[in-house]
Structure formats: structure tokens, C-alpha cells
Image (cartoon, coloured by chain):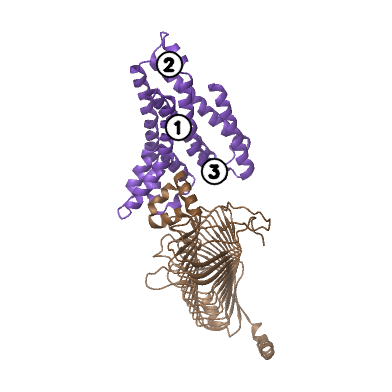
Amino acid sequence: MKHLLTLLVVVLITKPSIAQMVTVCKTCPISTLTDGIAQAKDFDTIVVKKGTYKEHNVIVDKPLTIIGEKYPVIDGELKGEIITIISDHVTVDGLFMINVGNSYTEDFAAIRVKNSKNFLIQNLVLEKLFFGIYIEKSRDGKVYHNKIIGEAVEEYNSGNGIQLWYSKNIEIEHNFVQHVRDGIYLEFSNACVIKNNVSALNVRYGLHFMFSNDDVYQDNTFENNGAGVAVMFSKRIKMFNNIFKENWGTASYGLLLKEINDAEIEGNIFEDNTIGINVEGTNRINYKHNIFKNNGWAIKVKGACYTNIFTENNFLYNSFDIAYNSKVNDNEFNKNYWSSYTGYDLDKNGIGDVPYRPVKLFSYIVNRTPETIILLRSMFIDIIDFSEKVSPVFTPDDLLDNNPQIKKLTW
Amino acid sequence: MRSRWSYVYFAFYLLLGIVLLFLNNDLSKAVITLMNVIIVLVPLIGTIFGVMYYYNSKEFTELLLAQPLKRSSIFLGQYLGVALSLSMSLILGLGIPFVFYGLFESSAIWDFSLLLITGTILTLIFTALAFNIALSNENKIKGFGYAILLWLFLAVIYDGLFLMTLILFEDYPLDKVSLIGTMLNPIDLSRTLILLKLDISALLGYTGAVFKQFFGTSFGLLVSFVMLTIWVVMPVLRIVFKSKKKDF
């Protein structure tokens, strides 16, 4: 309450100065954005009219609102960074930024936010970029409704769409990122929310976490990327209601989890991926209400994974439901629906009377000798799978779903 | 006898096609299920029909041999009669329901045609092999036994041996070996051809890349069809050769 009052007072006091407006256009006295920023006072609004402005290294060093009218073009002429924000309370809205400089030693971005608080970046269109929106050592900011379309072909000479580095409490919503290296990349960034974004056709990952904790991403779509989402060395990440689609290729996957602890994965859809989720060294993860459909492998578990709990997921028509490379199992499968379940339900309680074994012998063999995969769908393989199902020898014998559902789950 | 059984065969495929489409509601899914049927059932039916036909029409064949007819044309005629009628039943039986379901508007048409082509070739191969076995064995029971064994070997046991080899020599580079291994068995070759067309190739990882590189090119496709043709031609030549020398 106290905070609110102060805020109100601040707003009331600063109101007259907000009314100040600086207009930038090609024929005005102030014809460049750099000039406009130099002329403006704190908390002024700069309106940039339609036109093309050839500018780079524009530094925003005071709390300003920069608004583009009808998408003015800011052309960096491939000379370097375009806008750098080093002040708190900056808003950038409605610009069309192109031609960010490319460099092998510096990460030039279309717009960089450095050591700032309370910024808002929205409605930007970025094209021909190296890095798109680069947020470093900043906090409490918002990145909304931006459209980032790169031209990345190789990993080594391309940048990321939206990159967060040592940042905190950033909201990234309704952005559309295509053809860059990583659509959205978080490194050492905590308590961020990533929501309703579409990240597609990127060279490496749609979304990438490194050493970032307590982040949430939900309702995003990751389609046709080198790999959908990579979550690495992070804790307490929440992943809700995302769509991972068509990440299809020899080394592709929808979601990669590597050294992840205490995550929640709920309500996601994994469809047409070579590997739905690739799990390596993860502990205490809850998988609930996810749909795995038409993947090569729904889930591939490698290395030490403990207390991963899979409940009430739908596994539909995957070539392999689960692949495991060890005989030890500390993970739990319960109440899932498996389309390849062949058991029966005599007492009609909707739960199959025979436990389901999600790991087939063939998937164990393929893990050992990858070349054997060419025998996929051979009759011999069906026979050995069947005999393994009846009496497991090679696959972990405690790896089973004791309550397989008879009908597809709906929530 | 031939015509009656090929009607049954035709009806079976017709039913199969209708049921599959009815249950799946999805053309491309149905094509995958069909693949399983084709690579197992088609060779089996081809083998059994071939052997059965030969033994059943043996007396009639002997009658024909007394006529001024070329031996090769008699036996080739019999072989083609069985093989082609089986192929026709397969193509029509599966084709009709799929066409009615809207195959021509679907993208699955190429996969489906490949499926029918391989199915036809498998019929030709296994009927020819069956005739060979029947020609070499006077004893019906023995002939049937060998025919079933042949099918079992190519459809199941071969894959088992293949798998064993791959696991035993897993320390060595195996992609060439596995490529050759698949080329040698017509059932495996057809299965791989269809699987690669159905875009499962990405599943196959590194081996898949090698396979895709080979079968994906027109050269690879040509080589595999040449291989399948050899599988047809060799047994047919042996039918001609054997029938010329055989005492009846």
C-alpha cells in the first residue's frame, strides 16, 4: 500500500514532464533519433515519424519513451549495435530495425538493455539481425509483441533472437522469433516468465536455458527448430502447456533436459519429434498431463535420473515409448494411457489389470547397437519384444505402469 | 481352383483395406499398418499358393506335356497365371477401398503406390521360389515343408541372424554390412524401402543417414529395384531350366 501511494505521488509529480514530447522526422528540426535523445529531458516521449533513419550506436541514457509512428525504419547499415539502453524506465515501442552489424568478437544487438530496471520493449520488428534483443544485468523488464526474423544458416556466425544474461524478473510474451540461432536464450537469468511466444525454424534451439533458476515458460509453440527447447543446469523450471512440434532430424528432439532438478512439466504436447524428451541426469521431475504423439521416441532416458514421476500422460503411436540405457530404475510411471497397451480390464474400472512395460527389448538393443534400428518393424523384432514382455530379462523389471488406463485421458 | 482362391484372396484384401480405413480414418496411418501386413502376409500367401497350385494341377500338367507344346511356355504360363492373379487381387483388393476413400487427393499416393509395387514384386518372387521348390520335390509334404521353411527363414530367421551379427560385431563400423544385409533379403529390402519413404529415416540416426543417402538417391532406388528384379528373374530362369530337364 505504501508503495502504491509513493507510486501515485511520483506519477502525479512527474506528470507535467511526461507531457513533454519531442518529435523526430526527416523534415523536422530534429531529424535523428540521437539528436532527439540529446534534446529530450528525463521522462519525455520521443515520437519517431515514418521514414528511414540510418543510425547506429544510439545510446539511451535517460528514462525516455521512444515511440515509432507507422513503423519508422532504423537502419544500422551493418555497422554495429543499433540502440543501447543504459537507463532505467525506458520504453521502446513500434520501431522497424534492420541491418545489425555482424562480428565474431562482439555480440552486436538490435537493441541492448544494460544494467537497467523497469524497461518495456514492445511492438518491434527486427530483421537482418545478429543478436535481436539483448538484456544484460537488468531486471523487472517486459518484452512484448516483437517480431524477430533472422537469416541464420550456421551456428557459429549467427546470434540469438532474445537473449537474457544475468537478468532477473523479465516477462517475455507474445513474441515471434524465426530463423535465428536460439530463439530465446537465458543464461544466469532467474524468475523470468516466457509466455505465448512462437519460436520456429531456428538453427539451434527454440528456447534455451543455461544456469537459470525458477523460470516459467508456458503456452509457447516451438516448431521445426534444430531442437525445440534445451533446459540445462537449471533448477525449479516450470514448463506448462507448450507445444513442441516437428523437431525432426537425426539429432533432433522436442525437449532436452540436462542436469535439471525439481522441474514441473505439465500439459505440454509433443508431436512428430524424433525424440520427444531427451532426459539426462535429471532428478525429482513431475511429468503430468502431457501428450506424446507420433514421436520416434517419446522419452529417451540416459544416465542417472532419479525420482522422475510420470502420471496421467497420453502416449500415442510413438515408435518407442520409453528408451532406457540402464537396468536400474528409480522413476515411476503411473496411470498413463499407452496406445500400444494390449491388456484387458475385467473389473471395468478403467484401469488395465495387467501392468504395462513401456521399455521394449528392441529399444534396449537399439541403445546398445544403433545400427540394429534398420530391423524396425520386422517380424522377428515383434517376436522378441513379445517374449521380453512376458518375462523381462534385459529391461529393468520394476519399470512398469501398474495402472495403465484403458481409455485415452482427457483433462 | 485358381480363380476361386484368388477371389478369396481379393475379398480378404478388400476387407482388410476397408477395415483399416474405417478404424484409422487416416490414409497415411493405414499405409503404415498395411506395410506390416504386406511384408509378412504377401510372401506367405505367394509361397503357399505357388506350391499348392503346382501339386494340385500336376496331373493336368502331365496331360499338357503330352501335347506339342514348349515346356517353358507351359510352366511359365502356370507361374505367371498364379503370380499375376495374386498380384491383381492384391492391387485391386487394396486399391479399390483406398481409391474410394480419396487416395488421389491425398499425399499418401506415392507411399501407397510404392507399397503396391513392392507387394507385387514380393508376390512374383515368392511364387517363383515356391514353383522351384515344388519342381524339385515330388513329395507334397516335403515340398510344403520346405516352402514354409523358406518363408520362415526370409521373414523371421534371417532378421534374427542379422541382428545377432550386428550385436556381435558392434565394435566395428556396421553401416556397410547392414546395407548389404538388407539388400540380400527381398523382404528386408522392401521393408526398408517403404520405411524410408514413410519418413521414419530420421529415427534411424547415423545408420539412417547412410541408408537415406543410398536409398534416397535415384541410384539407390534403381539398385534396389534391380536387386528385386534379380530375385524375380533368377528363380524364373531356374523354373525354365529345371522344367526342361525334369522327368515326368
The color chain B is rendered in? purple
Which image quarter is the C terminus of chain A in?
bottom right
Picture residue at 46% right of the left edge, 26% below the top: B50
What chain letter is assigned to the residue under label 2?
B
Identify the secondary structure beneath mark 3.
Answer: helix
Q: Name the foreground residue: B170 vs A134.
A: B170
Q: Give the labeled residue for mark 2.
A: B74
Count neighbours of disc 1 (C-alpha within 10 A) and say few if under 14, some if 14 to 19, many if 20 or more.
many
Task: Residue type at mark 2: give it.
Answer: Ile
Please determine whether, in this image, residue B227 is positioned above or below residue A328: above
Task: Residue type at mark 3: give it.
Answer: Thr
The mark total stands at: 3
Instruction: Quote the CA–CA distance across marks 2 and 3.
Output: 38 Å
Q: Give the labeled residue for mark 3.
A: B33
CB-based contact (under 8 Å), mark 3 and mark 1: no
Task: Residue type at mark 1: give it.
Answer: Ile
Count neighbours of disc 3 (C-alpha within 10 A) and say few if under 14, some if 14 to 19, many if 20 or more.
few
Q: Are marks 2 and 3 on the same chain?
A: yes
Q: Which mark is residue A294?
A: none
Viewer-nearest of discs 2 and 1: 2
Question: In the rendered view, does A114 fall on the left or right side of B231?
Answer: right
Mark toward the start of the polypeptide (2 vs 3) = 3
Count neighbours of disc 2 (C-alpha within 10 A) and say few if under 14, some if 14 to 19, many if 20 or more.
some
Q: Which mark is residue B121?
A: 1
Mark toward the start of the polypeptide (3 vs 1) = 3
